[in-house]
Amino acid sequence: MRALQSLQRQVLSLIGRAVVKSINAATKCQTVDVELLAGDQKGGIEHLEPYGFTAVANEGSEAIVLFPDADRSHAVAIVVADRRYRIKGLKTGEVAFYDDQGQTVTLTRDGIVVDGAGKIITFRNAPKARFEMDIESTGQIKDRCDTDGLTMSAMRIAYNGHKHHENGQGNLTNTADKPMEA
């Protein structure tokens, strides 16, 4: 009976739930400081993240911590989650990335939805962006936006009202026969 109780204690001490107190994301393997049940503090625990994904969770996030060989001196965090910001209501098979500010990328059954939560979405360090589809916009489209660019609306107005001297003579041309439509 004693041997069974000892084995049970060892098995139970292999896994623990914890609350994240802080995260160090500057190291090769992110580390977390956590508080386990009963106030047991552990610092510098390696947080093993899936390849290609990384995040710095907020204080108060929850973690699942493993203690290989039931050695409480060397823990590994395998999951860090934060139920306060988790997206709810996804359909079976859907996937989402999210943060605590409401920014999301959701792979829905109907397509991909990017929600910038009112912040700028930036594509960086690419020679060009290629879209093999029609593009629709409910807002303005502006070229050379960091310098002297014009919106498509401004270009349309300039084109539709454009007149110039015909063949270098004094007569002005008519405006465009076929104006650009809005």
Image: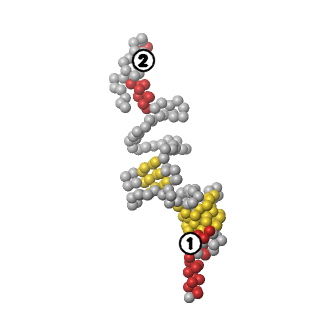
Residue 64's place in the image compared with 129, above or below, is below
Q: Residue at x 61, y 75 (%)?
A: 70
Quadrant (top left, top right, bottom left, bottom right) of the N terminus: bottom right
Where in the figure is residue 79, as x and y percent of width and height?
A: 54, 64
User: Is residue 118 shown left or right of residue 3?
Assistant: left
Where in the figure is residue 21, as x and y percent of width and height?
A: 61, 61
Name the residue tied to disc 2.
164
- What's the CA distance linking mark 1 and mark 2? 79 Å
Residue 112's place in the image compared with 169, above or below, is below
Name the residue furthest front.
Answer: 38
Q: Report if residue 26 is visible in the image.
A: yes
Where in the figure is residue 44, as x and y percent of width and height?
A: 65, 63
Number of the label disc, if any, that sits on residue 81: none
Question: Badge 1: few (under 14), some or many (20 or more) residues near its Cα, within 10 Å?
Answer: some
Quadrant (top left, top right, bottom left, bottom right) of the C terminus: top left
User: Is residue 160 shown left or right of residue 50?
Assistant: left
Q: Residue at x 39, y 12 (%)?
A: 171
Q: The disc labelled 2 sits on which kind of residue?
A: His
Where in the figure is residue 110, as x and y percent of width and height?
A: 37, 52
Q: The disc labelled 1 sits on which kind of residue?
A: Ile
Q: Secondary structure at mark 2?
A: loop
Rendering colour mode: secondary structure
Name the residue tied to disc 1.
15
Q: Nearer the viewer, residue 167 or 72?
A: 72
